[in-house]
Amino acid sequence: MRQKRAAGGEVNMPVEEAEIHLFTPNIEVKTRATGAVLGLQETRRHFDLRHELHNRPSKRKAKKMKRMREQEAATNPSEASSFKIDVDDDRFSRLFSNPEFAIDPTNPNFKKTAATDELLRVKRMRSSKLQFTRLKQKAVGGQDQQPSGLSFVSTAGPGKTGKSEKQKGKKGFTLFAKNA
């Protein structure tokens, strides 16, 4: 379709392009006939990667900004860091007794918060109390009451060390030796 200039110098747009202008007033539409500029397409056409890389902050500055954001987050407690956990609640008892729920601070996904610190502190305290009571029972009763799964005698296979059975001299090893 050809477009004609009106006396005032304005371009008469085809009906379809005029409808596009009605729905998207902030975006200019580029017409094929007149070469009117479409803002979005023009930025794509004149994209310069060197300009973008030049305006990006340097690695040192980015690290400094990241460090400042972390310090600000540490000094200003947010709602997430003000979360309180009730460690005496029975629903959380498996957190302390089941090894599947062990919290590993060395894990890269670990986030140090007041709640996780409290959980770790209580877990350490409970395990030390458990060890103390076991020592106390051993001193009083003469025997250590361990879970039944730990007081077995096991002979395991030779393992994969690369040595043959002749070099080892024995076929297996004894985990807990009984005095005969």
Image (spheres, rainbow, N blue to C red):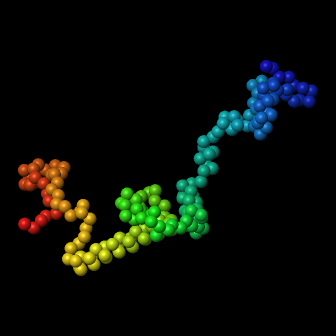
Instruction: Classify 117 as above or below 2.
Output: below
Residue 125 horizontal side relative to residue 18, left or right: left
Residue drawn at (77%, 35%), measured in percent from left and top? 23
Residue under the image location 40 percent in, 68 percent down:
123
Residue 3: give x, y in percent of width and height: 83, 22
Point out residue 166 in the picture as x, y percentages from the top left corner. Answer: 7, 50
Q: Is residue 49 left or right of residue 11?
A: left
Residue 160 located left or right of residue 89: left
In the rendered image, residue 106, in percent from the top left (x then y), is placed at 40, 61
Which quadrant: the N terminus?
top right
Task: Name the side, left or right, on which 93 lies relative to 42.
Answer: left
* Residue 72 seen in this snapshot: no
Residue 81, horizontal then vertical, whole percent: 55, 65
The quadrant the C terminus occupies is bottom left
Q: Is residue 33 above or below residue 72?
A: above
Residue at left 78%, top 26%?
16
Q: Nearer the viewer, residue 127 or 163?
A: 127
* Residue ID at (18%, 51%): 159
- Residue 72 position by quadrant: bottom right
User: Is residue 110 visible to the viewer in this orientation of the structure?
Assistant: yes
Picture quadrant where residue 105 is located: bottom left
In the foreground, 1 or 150: 150
The foreground one among 119 and 72 is 119
Quarter of the image where one finds residue 107: bottom left
Q: Looking at this view, name the residue that lies furthest to the right.
A: 7
Q: How many marks?
A: 0
Q: In the orientation shown, which residue stands out farthest toward the bottom?
A: 140
